[in-house]
Amino acid sequence: MICGADEAGRGPIFGPLVVAGVNIIDDSELIKIGVRDSKKLTPKRRELYAKYIKKIVEKYEFISIPAADIDELRKVMTLNELEVHIFSKIIEKLKPDICYVDAADVNEARFGKDILSKLSFKPTIISKHKADEIYPVVSAASILAKTIRDEQVRIIALELEKKLDIPLGSGYPSDPMTQKFLKKWVETYGDLPPHVRRSWQTARNLMNIQKTKKLDEF
């Protein structure tokens, strides 16, 4: 049994980090339907592939870590350590013989060894950068992680946009639309909105500006 594991949502300031894993006997069916890295697919295409993948694979698992939990966990571990922790939980549930993972660490071998050290069994771990472009089973995990996160972000956007009447954007700190949304929210409500990763530098900068404005009012 082979497994692929990947994440979606490492960098955004809004929403969860989602890690997904899939188990399959062999990847021939995934190759046949032409799975690819989720970032190279349109949202509609990803949704279509996700439905096929769920039917084809033997088993799949995912874990979604909300923004508030990410902030709490980052008080005691780095983002790489957090990913190792979640990847290992997914692999522990799937119990594959071989597992391909998309390495988050700059040292791809270390990422694989760190995951292996947390498992109660000893599968072969193949940890590679851009594994979602190399291995169809990781592409499949990437697609599931991305579609699950996208759905959760859509729910967040529906909740928050009603209160400002402007679009939230992609949720990435570099997105001008997301920057505008955050700035407007802080100006309107004096605090960051729900579902924001307060430990991100963009969030800290906004709150520092808000504190300075409050001091200037005295």
Image (cartoon, grey):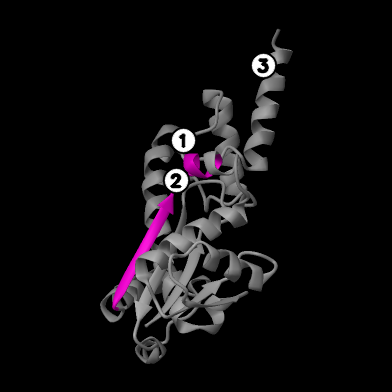
The residue shown at (66%, 41%) is: 202
Answer with the quarter of the image where residue 137 lies: bottom left
The residue shown at (65%, 64%) is: 105
Q: Kindly indicate whether the residue at mark 1 contacts the one at mark 2 (C-beta within 8 angstroms).
A: no
Three-letter code, disc 2: Pro
The secondary element bearing badge 1 is classed as: loop
Sort mark 1 into few (<14), some (14-19) or many (20+) by Cα contacts within 10 Å: some
Answer with the quarter of the image where residue 93 lies: bottom left
* Residue 160 visible in the displayed image: yes
x then y, percent, for residue 212: 72, 21
Q: Quadrant of the C terminus?
A: top right
Extreme residue in the left direction? 55
Nearer mark to the viewer, of 3 and 2: 2
x then y, percent, for residue 115: 54, 65
x then y, percent, for residue 45: 39, 74
The residue shown at (63%, 50%) is: 78
Q: Is residue 60 above or below residue 211?
A: below
- Which disc is residue 37 wearing? none
Q: Is residue 172 above or below residue 99?
A: above
Magenta range: 58-71
In the displayed structure image, the side of residue 144 where residue 17 appears, left or right: right
Sort mark 2 into few (<14), some (14-19) or many (20+) by Cα contacts within 10 Å: some
Mark 1 and mark 3 lie on one chain; the one further toward the N terminus is: 1
- Which disc is residue 194 wearing? 1
Three-letter code, disc 3: Lys
Q: Is residue 107 above or below residue 148?
A: below
Nearer mark to the viewer, of 1 and 3: 1
Mark 2 and mark 1 lie on one chain; the one further toward the N terminus is: 2
Instruction: Read off the residue under disc 2.
Output: 66
* Residue 11 visible in the displayed image: no
Sort mark 3 into few (<14), some (14-19) or many (20+) by Cα contacts within 10 Å: few
**Closer to the camera, 47 or 17?**
17
